Amino acid sequence: MPALVLLGAQWGDEGKGKATDLLGGSVDYVVRYQGGNNAGHTVVVGDQKYALHLLPSGILSPGCTPVIGNGVVVDPSVLLSELSGLNERGVDTSKLLISGNAHIITPYNVTVDKVTERFLGKRKIGTTGRGIGPTYADKINRVGIRVQDLYDESILTQKVEAALDVKNQVLTKLYNRRAIAVGQVVEELLGYAAQIERYVADTVLVLNQALDDDKVVLFEGGQGTLLDIDHGTYPFVTSSNPTAGGACTGAGVGPTKISRVIGILKAYTTRVGAGPFPTELFDEDGEALRRIGGERGVTTGRDRRCGWFDAVIARYATRVNGLTDFFLTKLDVLTGWEQIPVCVAYEIDGKRVEELPYSQTDFHHAKPVYETLPGWSEDITKAKSFSDLPKNAQNYVKALEEMSGAPISAIGVGPGRDETIEINSFL
């Protein structure tokens, strides 16, 4: 019953796609369990680069069944566009399964997301504007549209009417926007029904039966731990639970079936959108990390904010996820620095703090306390084993492992599928 959870241990964009793809050839199912097309994965296979937004990374592994779980919010137009793009490049997408209980991102969810962010002005959260938050809000308010609703026009119409009763009042009277017609939304949503019907399934049953049959199932989180709605830097977070517990609710699999939890950790730190970021750099080093690391959002196209490695948030991720392993990515980006600072603690109101403060106010005022480690100048992209790395690179990895609280079992030394050093097997 080998079930693994793979998730981001920072603010997202850690390289989860590469890690999932690396394991894809060894697992039977790869499951997205939360988020939507606000999460982007870049996977490099040979000389081909794939940018995935909604689909699980396992869709690029021929023997793997990719699954979109009930905890995901699905924009049908984005889904069909992504499938079409992969099909045109010769990727077989026929095995995809989509939970009938996954919620649909409707056109009005996208509209509400965009106008709300504009209305907030300087207080905006920094959302992607793709309707993710409003869709999750509808889900919690019990006025959401699920994939299965596309196959009952009467129920679909009733649900759209109920949702727009309130939303049209807000759009017209608060935001001075035009009301959205119920019939237009229903017609658009019904147009997707036949196109995705062959993928829709009872994925909870499928996944539990697979685990009972000793199949290997990998649960893939979007975003990262510090963007979790409950455990992240609220309110500058996503609207779902990327942490390990989210895999259980977002896929319908009990916690006793999870055998390993792997945290993806970038060798430095990045963040997209607003919110506190203690190690953020505004100098030449920050610009160099952005340039060398290609730090631009896969989904948003926005430049990522860059900073040095933060061991405090790594320890926090270990704790709230129960991490058993780390996959350290982008170590090669740090090649060329003579000295590499690492944040080992924070200073808050003149006091040294070793753990992530629970208070939003304290975290906003946290200043990084750095220790500096010797860097390296040798090219590490051809390294195949830990001993192939320069001594200072080895010491850097060992230091991060000791500070973070879980073993580093794999290291990314380049963007390619084969540019990975495996220290301990995840399976």
Image: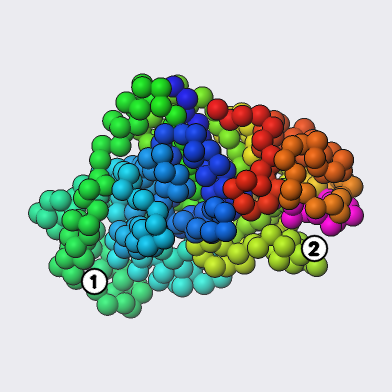
Q: Specify the quadrant that holds the N terminus.
A: top left
Q: Judge from the rendering whether residue 225 lies leftward or rightward of residue 116; answer left or right.
A: right
- Write the start and end of the magenta stretch as one range: 328-341
Q: Residue at x 22, y 57 (%)?
A: 195
Q: Residue at x 40, y 71 (%)?
A: 115
Give x and y (percent) for residue 91.
40, 54
| Amino acid on which the number 2 mark rests in the picture | Asp
Give x and y (percent) for residue 226.
59, 47
Disc nearest the viewer among 1 and 2: 2
> Answer yes or no: do the residues labelled 1 and 2 have beta carbons within 8 Å?
no
At numbered mark 2, what does the secondary structure look like: helix, strand or loop? Answer: helix
Residue under numbered circle 2: 285
Q: How is the image coloured?
A: rainbow
**Is any part of residue 384 visible from this angle?**
yes
Few, some or many C-alpha atoms within 10 Å of disc 1 (few <14, some 14-19, many ≥20)? some
Q: Is residue 75 magenta?
A: no
Give x and y (percent) for residue 403.
76, 36
Q: Is residue 333 magenta?
A: yes
Q: Residue at x 87, y 50 (%)?
A: 375
Few, some or many C-alpha atoms within 10 Å of disc 2 (few <14, some 14-19, many ≥20)? some
Residue at the far left: name it: 154
At numbered mark 1, what does the secondary structure look like: helix, strand or loop? Answer: loop
In front here: 358 or 77? 77
Whether 207 is drawn above or below 328: the answer is above
Q: Which mark is residue 180?
A: 1
